[in-house]
């Protein structure tokens, strides 16, 4: 598909979005999964993205809170982690898989909290200025997309597997 990429879900800065169980199945190609969110009853249990810079769960330009409960989230493109956070993102009881990128990326003073989540990354394709392969990347860029400050990564009752490289890079 050429041109503008459709948004699966949208959440505006400062708003909250809570995703819970559903029986829907959605496979999205060449799009972001939940990105800029707006409160909505649209629920996704399975999100698959394919293509460059296509995170399954993503916030953009900082702020807000995102909570995702249950489901399977898979990405298969360069620079396409399962989670890309410039906000405070909580994921519960889910499986995250990235076949070509990090599993989780936290930019700036933001956070990701995983509870009963299994993360599998195969960061086999370096993107941009990447020089190492990792499952979880925590960094501060100068793009202005994320607030400066301390990032926070919390994980309870889950697993992190990286098929290529290190688990953490800070």
Image: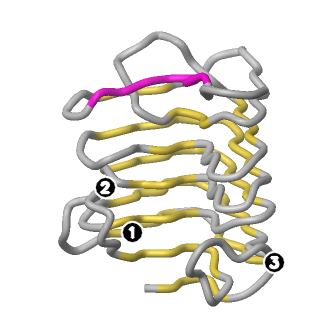
For the residues labelled 2 and 1, the Cα–Cα distance comes to: 19 Å
User: Can you identify the residue that label 1 sits on?
Assistant: 153
**Is residue 11 located in the magenta-colored stretch of the structure?**
yes
- Residue at 32% across, 74% down: 140
Picture quarter containing residue 25? Answer: top right
Disc 2 is placed on an element classified as loop
User: Can you identify the residue that label 3 sits on?
Assistant: 163
Picture quarter containing residue 2? Answer: top right
Of pointers 3 and 1, the one earlier in the residue sequence? 1
Other residues around mark 2 within 10 Å, as few (<14) / some (14–19) / many (≥20) = some
Vertically, is 9 above or below 159?
A: above
User: Can you identify the residue that label 2 sits on?
Assistant: 145
Q: Position of residue 158 (x, y in %)?
A: 60, 63
Q: Position of residue 97 (x, y in %)?
A: 73, 55
- Residue at 54% across, 43% down: 57
Of the two numbered discs 2 and 3 in the rendering, the one whose residue sits closer to the viewer: 2
Determine the residue located farthest toward the front in the rendered image. 3
Other residues around mark 1 within 10 Å, as few (<14) / some (14–19) / many (≥20) = some
**Magenta residues, start to end:** 6-12
Q: Quadrant of the N terminus?
A: top right
State the residue in front, 98 or 80: 80
- Residue at 43% across, 24% down: 10
For the residues labelled 3 and 1, the Cα–Cα distance comes to: 20 Å
Please say if the residues under marks 2 and 1 sit with CB atoms less than 8 Å apart: no
């Amino acid at each position: 598909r050429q041109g503008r990429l459709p948004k699966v879900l949208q959440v505006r800065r400062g708003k909250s979005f809570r995703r819970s169980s559903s029986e829907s199945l959605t496979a999205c190609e060449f799009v972001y999964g939940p990105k800029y969110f707006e409160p909505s009853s649209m629920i996704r249990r399975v999100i698959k993205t394919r293509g460059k810079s296509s995170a399954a769960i993503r916030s953009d330009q900082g702020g807000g809170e995102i909570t995702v409960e249950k489901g399977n989230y898979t990405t298969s493109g360069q620079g396409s982690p399962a989670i890309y956070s410039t906000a405070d993102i909580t994921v519960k009881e889910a499986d995250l898989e990235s076949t070509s990128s990090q599993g989780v990326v936290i930019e700036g003073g933001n956070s990701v909290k995983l509870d009963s989540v299994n993360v599998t990354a195969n960061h086999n394709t370096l993107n941009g200025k990447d020089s190492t392969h990792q499952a979880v990347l925590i960094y501060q860029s100068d793009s202005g997309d994320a607030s400066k400050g301390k990032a926070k990564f919390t994980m309870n009752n889950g697993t992190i597997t990286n098929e290529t490289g290190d688990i953490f890079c800070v």
